[in-house]
Structure formats: C-alpha cells, structure tokens
Amino acid sequence: MGPLKGFRIIEMAGMGPGPFCGMLLSDLGAQVLRVERHGTSADVYDPLQRNRLRLALDLKDRDQVAVLLDIVEHADALFEGYRPGVAERLGFGPDDCLGRNARLVYGRMTGWGQDGPLASRAGHDINYIALSGALHAIGRPGERPVPPLNLVGDFGGGGMLLAFGMLCALLERERSGQGQVVDAAMVDGSIALMAMLLGMQAHGSHCNQVGEHFLAGAAHYYDTYRTKDGKFMAVGPLEPQFYAELIAKAGLDPKLFGDRGFMSAEDGPQCWAELKPLLAEQFMTRTRDEWCAVFAGSDACVTPVLTLEEAPRDPHNRARQAFVEVAGVPQNAPAPRFSRTPAAHPAPATAEPAAVKELLSQWGCSREQVARAAAFSAQRAVTAEIAS
C-alpha cells in the first residue's frame, strides 16, 4: 500500500536524518532494506526504524560488500549518511554502485555537503543551523539563541530534503533512464527553510538581533503564555481580523491593544514590549482548560500547548488519527495522506531471516545471492548474540 509501492530502496543505517528519510519512504509504501552494522538491535518502539527489514553486513569485509553490490543491481535507490569519501573507501561509493546499476539513485546525507572547507568536519544539528543563520533567529530578546530540538537540521533540512531529492531523481529517471547522485546537506536544507526570512531581510523587515523578529516571540501576538495552573497557551493571530478576535475573546482593552504595533516594523518592538506583560498577566487569570473553553470555535488562533503525552489524546488529533499505535506505543501516523493509495498501518522493524530472504527474492536476487546475504546476516547475528 502507499504511493511508493514497488520502489526498492537500500538504507545504509545511520542516525537521525537517514532513518527519518527511511521512515518517510517506507511509510508511503517503498520496500526499504536497512543494512546495519554488527551488534545493531532493532528498537520496536522507535518510529524511525519502523516498516523496514534489516540485514546485517560487515562493511569492512570485501566479501560482504560484494553482497551489498549484488543487491544494488536490483534496487531503485540507495542512501547513506557517511562522511565524504567513506563509502568510496569501503567499496560502495557512487561509482561502484552506478557501475553495477546505471539506473540507481544514490542519496548522500551529510551535515556540510560533499565539498567545501567543512565537508570532512564532524557536526550536529546545532552546528549546521548555526552556520545557516537559522539558529540566530530563534530565541528571546536579549538572550542567547535557543536550539529548536533537532527539527530544523536533522529532520526538516536533512531527512525530509533527502527524501524529496531522491524522489525527484527517481521521477527524472523515468524520462532519462539514468540514475544520479543526490547531495543533501543539512546546512543547505536549513538555508532553504529560511527562505521567507531571507525575503523579509531583503525588504528590510527582518531584525538581525536574537529574538527581535515577530515570529521569534518578540511580538505579544505571537508567543506562548503561562496559565493559572502552570500550563501554556499558544497565541498567533497574524491577521487583523484574528487579532481583533483575540482582543475580544481574551477581554483585553481594545483602546490599549487595538492595532498598536501590530505587524509594524517601525513602532512594533516598543509596543510589543509594552503589551506583552499585560497579555501575560491576563492569561494568568484562568487555567489552560478555561482558556480553551473561551477560545473554542474561535478564529483567534489560540491553542493549548500540549505535551507529547497529551497530544495523542487531543480531540482533533484523535479525529484525524494523527497518531497510531505500533507495538502498543503511540507514534506519528504516516504523512501526508493520499486519497487513492493510502499508506498501510506502520509495523515494527524486523530482521526475520525468512522475511529478508523473501524480500531479496522479490527484488530479483539469485538464489546464490540470497543465500550469501542470509549466511552473512545470520553470522553477524550469532556474533552479536555472543558479544552481548
């Protein structure tokens, strides 16, 4: 099931953006074979590992790399997240793989990209978004930049960009008949996510100080506020008619709040600083549930700030079935949704030998190739069990 049904993709196991890319592709129907190193164990509770069959190979062993290349002959795509040059050194770089399968799409996920002064340097999400300018835009006025978890670099600017790039290359292959290499760098993806703010800066409406932009929480009408019970509400009416509804529903003085500083680059910051504590004081007069009742059915763009534990129980999320249970644990449902080719319910990752053999046979691997892959995988599994 899913719109990617029939696509055969090899995932060279890694961390963060790579598994996220694998989850996106497998959620939507692609057959993703996850090639893992010695001693790696599946986490049935981890959404980033779901829907994949797992094959254990020692990539420092030339014979086992040869098994991987045999499988590459039957795949549509492969993606890896090693530093530049590592896959080449191990014997399954782009030239090796495209030499065996000229139609292959070869995806590369790195932080800094395949070239440039930093290409070989280590880094993590916070470093990539720091260099892109994204991190500097997030934080409270007068304070330090605040890391937005690892959502911008690893996932939005990394794994999602890689999945998008690979699908674009697969579409192009249908016209040209040729594969190619997709160089997805988290710093590039982070810069792409900043497109709107780059445009604002070009028009002189973006602030260069931490937390001074209205979308960064500087404005009173785009921020979170603590409630009487110590919880929070999110406020974000960016349009005048919605802002007017916030004023009316929250019981604010329209003469004091009105449109003063609303979306204004000139007197905005001064008004925001004046009005924010007043709005914060107002939200402290009721509990979160009481405010939810006040804004129920409203276009004031005010919502409760839910915890990860609360989000699956939210009425809207429940109605949309935005969360699903996998191995008894709530996880994100596959997204986006498709009217004619819906995604199947996610399943935990598995290394079941029979399932791996069946998959490789379906891909067109010969009996000998399937047997060699199964033998090496079983050997690695036994070694891992002994080591543990």
Image: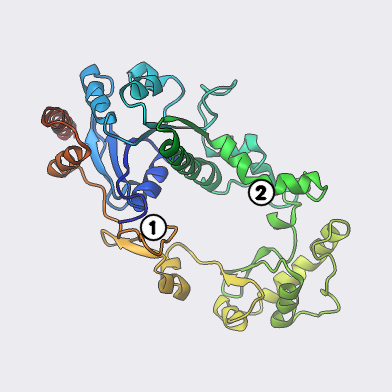
Identify which residue is drawn at 34% across, 63% down: 324
**Quadrant hosting residue 362:** top left
Q: Where is residue 244 in the image (x, y as percent from the top left)?
A: 75, 77
Viewer-proximal residue among 231 and 265: 265
Distance between mark 1 and mark 2 Cα atoms: 28 Å
**Quadrant hosting residue 127:** top right
**Quadrant hosting residue 326:** bottom left
State which mark lies toward you, 1 or 2: 1
Q: Is 135 situated left or right of 371 in this image?
A: right
Name the quadrant of the N terminus.
Answer: bottom left
Q: Is 101 situated left or right of 367 in this image?
A: right
Q: Position of residue 182 (x, y in %)?
A: 47, 32
Helix, strand or loop for disc 1: loop
Residue 273 in view of the camera: yes
Query: Which amino acid type is marked by label 2?
Result: Ile
Figure disc tally: 2
Q: Position of residue 103 (x, y in %)?
A: 36, 31
Q: In this view, does 17 lie above or below 123?
A: below
Neighbour class for label 1 at 10 Å: few (<14), some, many (≥20)? many
Identify which residue is drawn at 64% across, 43% down: 135
Residue 334's tag is 1
Mark before the other along the chain sequence, 1 or 2: 2
Residue 265's tag is none
Residue under pointer 2: 138
Name the quadrant of the C terminus.
Answer: top left
Q: Is 226 situated left or right of 353 in this image?
A: right
Identify which residue is drawn at 28% across, 20% down: 60
Helix, strand or loop for disc 2: loop
Query: Which amino acid type is marked by label 1?
Result: Pro
Q: Where is residue 80 in the image (x, y as percent from the top left)?
A: 39, 32
Residue 58 in view of the camera: no
